[in-house]
Image (cartoon, rainbow, N blue to C red):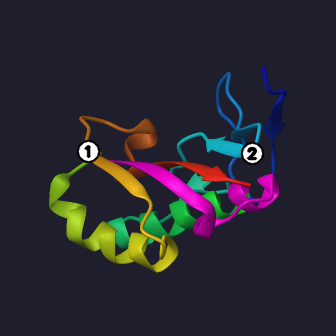
């Protein structure tokens, strides 16, 4: 079995439970879902789907970078929206970061942590 390595960076919100920001397994990195917490303040500051999606992407970018990967190496994303009516606005932000069009699932969920509007997780190569 491949060695598992925990990824941690101060440039993304710290894990608020018994999990890691990401795990490297072999030549793959699996991120935990990122929500729009500003890592400097520890708060959710944005109130719109666009603002929250931007913060999520910044957090994911920091975790991917700390792992030695990046958006361009993403192979699969899972996106959780609090309201599917935000799908188009979310897509506009998402498309700026995931320019290689990785495989994706996008679902609406009843509630997200801290009642945020969006959460995204990524599987990427190193």
Observer-side mark, 1 or 2, equals: 2
Say which residue label 2 marks: 27
Q: Identify the residue at image location x=75%, y=45%.
A: 27
Residue lying farthest left?
Answer: 85
The tag earlier along the polypeptide, 1 or 2, is 2
Check residue 76 for magenta coloring. yes
Q: Identify the residue at image location x=67%, y=53%.
A: 125
Q: Nearer the viewer, residue 16 or 8?
A: 8
SS class, disc 2: loop
User: To which quarter of the image does residue 25 belong?
Assistant: top right
Q: Identify the residue at image location x=47%, y=76%.
A: 99
Q: Position of residue 126 (x, y in %)?
A: 74, 55
Q: Is residue 43 left or right of residue 47?
A: right
Dots 1, 2 in contact, CB < 8 A: no
Residue 10 circle label: none
Q: Nearer the viewer, residue 41 or 87?
A: 87
The residues colored magenta run 63-81
SS class, disc 1: strand
Q: Nearer the viewer, residue 41 or 107?
A: 107
User: To which quarter of the image does residue 1 belong?
Assistant: top right
Check residue 78 for magenta coloring. yes
The image shows residue 1, relative to residue 98, as above or below, that is above
Is disc 1 surrounded by few (<14), some (14 to 19) or many (20+) residues within 10 Å?
few
| Residue 75 seen in the figure | yes
Question: In whole angstroms, how far apart are the C-alphas of marks 1 and 2?
Answer: 27 Å
Q: Position of residue 30 (x, y in %)?
A: 63, 41
Say which residue label 1 marks: 107
Q: Identify the residue at image location x=67%, y=27%.
A: 19
């Amino acid at each position: 079995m491949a060695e598992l390595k925990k990824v941690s960076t101060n440039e993304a919100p710290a894990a608020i439970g018994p999990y890691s920001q990401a795990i490297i397994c072999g030549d793959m990195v699996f991120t935990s879902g990122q929500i729009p917490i500003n890592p400097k303040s520890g708060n959710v500051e944005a109130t719109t789907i666009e603002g929250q999606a931007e913060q999520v992407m910044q957090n994911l970018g920091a975790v991917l970078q700390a792992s030695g990967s990046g958006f361009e190496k993403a192979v699969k994303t899972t996106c959780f929206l609090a309201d599917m009516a935000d799908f188009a606005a979310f897509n506009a932000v998402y498309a700026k970061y995931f320019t290689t069009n990785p495989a994706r699932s996008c679902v609406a969920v009843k509630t997200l942590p801290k009642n945020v509007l969006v959460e995204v997780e990524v599987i990427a190569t190193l």
